[in-house]
Image: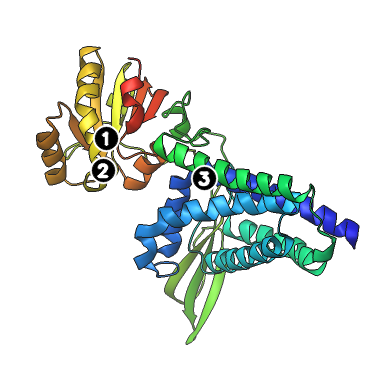
Amino acid sequence: MKYLVHISRIFVGILFIISGFIKLNDPLGFSYKLQEYFGADVLNLEFLIPYALIFSVFVVVFEVVLGVFLLIGYKPKFTVYSLLAMIVFFTFLTFYSAYFDKVKDCGCFGDALKLTPWESFTKDVILLVFILILVYGIKHIKPLFKSLPNTVLALLSFIVSLWFGYHVLMHLPSIDFRAYAIGKNIQEQMIIPEDAPKPVLEYTWTFNVNGEEQEFVTNGSYPTVDGEYVGVETETIDEGYIPPIQDFSIESDDEDLTSYYLDKEKLVIVATYNICSSEEDGLIKLKSFTDRAINAGFTVIGLTSSGEAEKQKVKSDYNLNFNFYLCDEKVIKTIVRANPGVVILNKGTVVNKAHWNDIEDIQL
């Protein structure tokens, strides 16, 4: 039993640290995922949505710290039972999400590793088994060091985790796992190769045959049935190839300008997914930066999901010398983890990006 506890201790500790660190690298992204869970379509706890970022930071810091606590053997009872409570909660959450098909990606490993809801639930069940082993064999979890060094390490893990979370919130994730990372080309990631796997769909047709409803399953072809058609249901068996970027667009009220702007050699995009919730200090900084970019020969545009009235108001209030275009809110949140944030493109390739705190340091 002792050796099984040691193996479980190492496995659970390392996995919690890795999972927590990946989310701690992007707590804002994890808060967006929590907002999905809190929404009306999942847990119907919409009153918690404004506090999603606070929950995000608390959960990911706690996750990393518990992993460290477990590895060094600091306060074993508190650590093991906290791990048990956390994994029970997340196992319920992932099962609910998978069974009712509510959230397509759990966000367990941020954007570094995408898991389907059922894969995430399976992962949580496996973790639950290992943590139950720790609960049963808690007496075998001994401190790795003496009391003072163990306490110092525990405190350092908390301080460093909290500092790192604050740092990436005030700037940008240190490691960008998303499709809009520096060096990636947006157009290339929107292309579906000709030889890419196609979606596999299953159709369940319902016909009234001699007064009785009967179902016929096909892969798409209309069934030859001597009866009256009632309806059809479609189920996706395999989604096939999904390009990394699907919904990126730059649109005016009249036309789609995506290709036009992605062909520009020197393009600055000011990304603000919701103008009304933008940081005022960031909006103030935009004026000098965008004027400097225009003088350096850059085309400057804004991307937002806000309406025309909000666009015109922010232009007038902050004397901005560029136009805002429409883009999906979720896409803008994915492009840059700041509101506002700045992205610099060269023919669709991301050459730089920055949080509004850092735009004064961008070299043009």
Disc 2 target residue: 278
**Position of 96 compared to 331: left or right?**
right
CA neighbours of label 2 inside 10 A, class few (<14), some (14 to 19), many (20+): some
- From the viewer's side, name the closer residue of 168 and 338: 168
Q: What residue type is labelled 2?
A: Ser
Q: Residue at x 19, y 20 (%)?
A: 291
Pointer 1 residue? 282
Residue 279 relative to residue 38: left or right: left
Of all residues, the one furthest to the left in this rendering is 316
- Could you say where residue 356 lies in the image, as x and y percent from the top left? 32, 32
Q: Which amino acid does label 1 sit on?
A: Gly
Quarter of the figure with residue 75? bottom right
Location of mark 3 (residue):
162
Q: Residue furthest front?
A: 148
Q: Which quadrant does the N terminus fall into? A: bottom right
Q: Can residue 331 be seen in this view?
A: yes
Secondary structure type for disc 1: helix
- Residue depicted at 9% across the width and 35% down the height: 316
Q: Is disc 2 in contact with disc 1, using a CB cutoff of under 8 Å?
A: yes
